[in-house]
Image: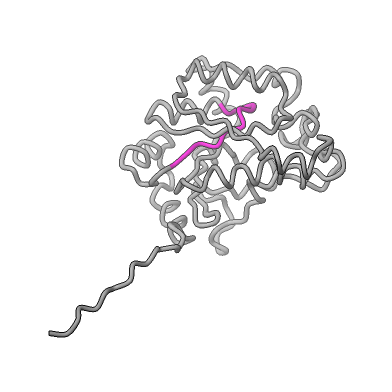
Amino acid sequence: MGEQVRIADRINTAPRYTEVDAVRLNNMFRGRDTVEMLTVLLLENMLGDAAIVSSFGAESAVLLHLIASIAATPVLFLDTGKHFPETISYREELRNIIGLLDLRIIAPDPAHLAQKDGTGLRWSYDPDGCCEIRKVLPLKAALAGFDAQFTGRKAFQSATRKALPRFEIEEGRLKVNPLADWDKAKIEAYMAEHALPVHPLVAQGYPSIGCSPCTTKVAPGEDPRSGRWKGWDKVECGIHAAVTPLDDSANDPIF
């Protein structure tokens, strides 16, 4: 008898999701209600291991409440060390009201922070570098064990998000934007219906809230995100990119 040939074990390093999957999911859920879509995704385990990435900003309560009402899901919060005190208080308020059972506080690597931003002032001369250290790298590490992430982005927030689809791909991971087609009126109606508290800075003229050094008030009629990194050629922190349609033949957002 000949020797049995041993088949070497192979680790599949291919991305779990591709652009084809994002297009398929956008088509599958096109025109369907957000709650219906989330219920199918979560209860039928269509996403694998998924987490919510939340800034606990102006409109964060809606997505957190929607998903928590369907299934317990890990929530990742990037504690950059530069948040408004009101954001930290609001995070704890929502944790208690909504019942967020798996809230994970993600912080920058202390050694990397000391090496790259020992003075804590990098935001003032290199906001991209500050975001890289305090947001992008910590989140990348935290998401390594997840197949998909939920974000609270909406198309109405800025010109760079107007083509935002419900599903997109980032580094082989599925990024789900359940509120992509929600407008401000729908956000406010949901919060009122479910008695969700509003971030305390909203009433002071902050419709989009990030780190305190890089967030300013917004004038009436401006994009909600125009108060972020004012004076810099910068519109995203780096954990999200400006959005282009998945299908070049489509001119409208894919909802």
Q: Position of residue 129 (x, y in %)?
A: 77, 47
Report the residue at 76% width, 23% height from top. Answer: 205
Q: Which residues are magenta?
A: 50-60
Q: Residue at left 35%, top 46%?
A: 46
**Residue 42: within the magenta?**
no
What percent of the width, then of the height, locates residue 58? 64, 26
**Image coords of residue 139 (percent x, y):** 59, 43
Taking the view exactly as shown, the residue that stands out farthest to the left is 1
Q: What x and y, as percent, mark residue 173?
A: 49, 52
Residue at image point 46% right, 46% down: 146
Residue 143 as seen in the image, left or right of residue 6: right
Q: Is residue 56 magenta?
A: yes
Q: Nearer the viewer, residue 10 or 204?
A: 10
Quarter of the figure that contains the N terminus = bottom left
| Residue 112 vs residue 189, the one in the foreground | 112
Left-right relation of 59 to 2: right
Q: Is residue 139 above or below residue 248?
A: above
